[in-house]
Amino acid sequence: MRVVSIDGPWYLEGWCHRAQDVRLFRLDRIEALSVLDEDGTPPAQARPRDLGNGLFQPGADDLRVSIDVAPEAAWVVDYYPTESVEERPGDVSRVTLAVADRAWLRRLLLRLGAGAQVVEPAEVAADVAGAASAALALYEES
């Protein structure tokens, strides 16, 4: 549908057949592409995103996640859009994020390590704990 530059990187905005919705694809992260034998014209309901307020704009159906972040992970508040930030005892901030991609959230939380703890929802905490255990098990094997 269009190619746009947002804060430096370039994105292709187009209709995603898999998601059946408009998506942004960061051009420098596309590993492979192929030409399909089907019409690439976006459907009539496809509309370009309003990017005036930034790249990520949370939707009503996005998952809301609350995490407690320690001072060493406080950069999350400056780097990602938050719905709320509440100061807690012990220099901890309770941060609520809208998340459209659970895999992205898992990577972020694994990256933060002990600097962040999922408060809710419980299934996200369990998912991240399982991913962390699996990653640690790989170190024990080698």
Image (cartoon, rainbow, N blue to C red):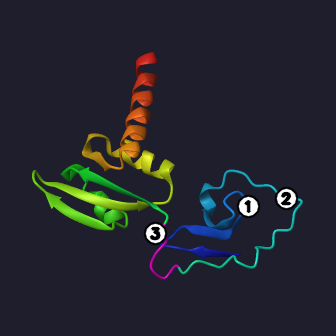
Amino acid beneath label 2:
Leu
Query: Residue at label 3?
Result: 58
The span from disc 2 to disc 3 (Cα, nearest Å) is 31 Å
Secondary structure predominantly adopted by residues drawn in magenta:
loop
In the image, is residue 101 above or below residue 137? below
* Local crowd size for mark 1, using a 10 Å CA cut-off: few (<14), some (14–19), many (≥20): few
Q: Which residue is mark 1?
A: 17
Neighbours of disc 3 within 10 Å: few (<14), some (14-19), many (20+): some
Can you give x and y, in whole percent of width and height, for residue 77 in the image?
29, 62
Q: In the rendered image, which residue does mark 2 sit on?
A: 36
Q: Is residue 120 magenta?
A: no
Pinpoint residue 118: horizontal percent, then vertical percent: 31, 47
Q: Answer yes or no: do the residues labelled 2 and 1 have beta carbons within 8 Å?
A: yes
Task: Classify 102 as above or below 114.
Answer: below
Q: Residues within 10 Å of mark 2 (few under 14, many from 20)?
A: few
Question: Is residue 61 at all visible to an observer of this figure?
Answer: yes
Residue at figure coordinates x 49%, y 64% from the top left: 61
